[in-house]
Image: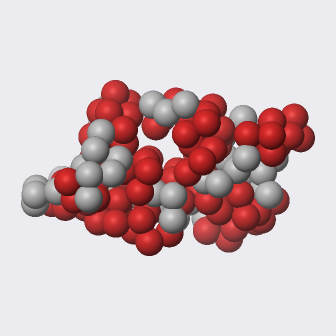
Amino acid sequence: MEITLSFVLPDPAIEPLALFGLQTRNAEEGIRQLKRGLPAQGWAVLVNSLGANEKDLAAVVQIPTTTLARRKKAGRFTLEESERLLRVARLVAQAQRVFRSQQGVARWFNQPNRGLGGATPLEYASTPIGAEEVERVLERILDGSPA
């Protein structure tokens, strides 16, 4: 008797949407939800996941604190803000796969990293190029290479 185990790996393109309470079945659905704007209740989850404070995360995703207050009240971020938030959420999802604990993720994002020129991964993630570098460091850690 042959036993086959099957499981589906999470789609890295849409997995980070779960941090915002969104359950999507495929990329097409994820795109629609992103275009509507990410729900503001995901902000607190992202802040907590990063072990950051609101002011620091707002600076990284380039959302003024006054705008952040309005978005929380309105319940949604704009598409442009959502894209920047998703960039950071992708890194959080990847870090969760690497470190497997909330404390490990938060500690890593807030400690200076030699591979990032001494900047913290959170600081470095403020631009698309910086976020790609953070992703590369996480991949090196996952592969067992020096980060």
Does residue 89 appear left or right of residue 91 in this picture?
Answer: right
Q: Residue at x 61, y 68 (%)?
A: 27
Image location (x, y in percent) of residue 117 = 26, 59
Tell me where residue 62 sits by quadrant. Answer: bottom right
Q: Residue at x 35, y 47 (%)?
A: 120
Does residue 138 appear left or right of residue 66 in this picture?
Answer: left
Residue 117 or 35: which is nearer the viewer? 117
Q: Residue at x 78, y 51 (%)?
A: 77
Residue 140 or 53: which is nearer the viewer? 53
**Does residue 70 lie above or below 5 as drawn?**
above
Image location (x, y in percent) of residue 129 = 44, 71
Residue 4 or 107: which is nearer the viewer? 107
Quadrant holding the C terminus: bottom left
Q: Residue at x 55, y 51 (%)?
A: 60
Looking at this view, name the residue that lies furthest to the front. 118
Image location (x, y in percent) of residue 118 = 26, 52
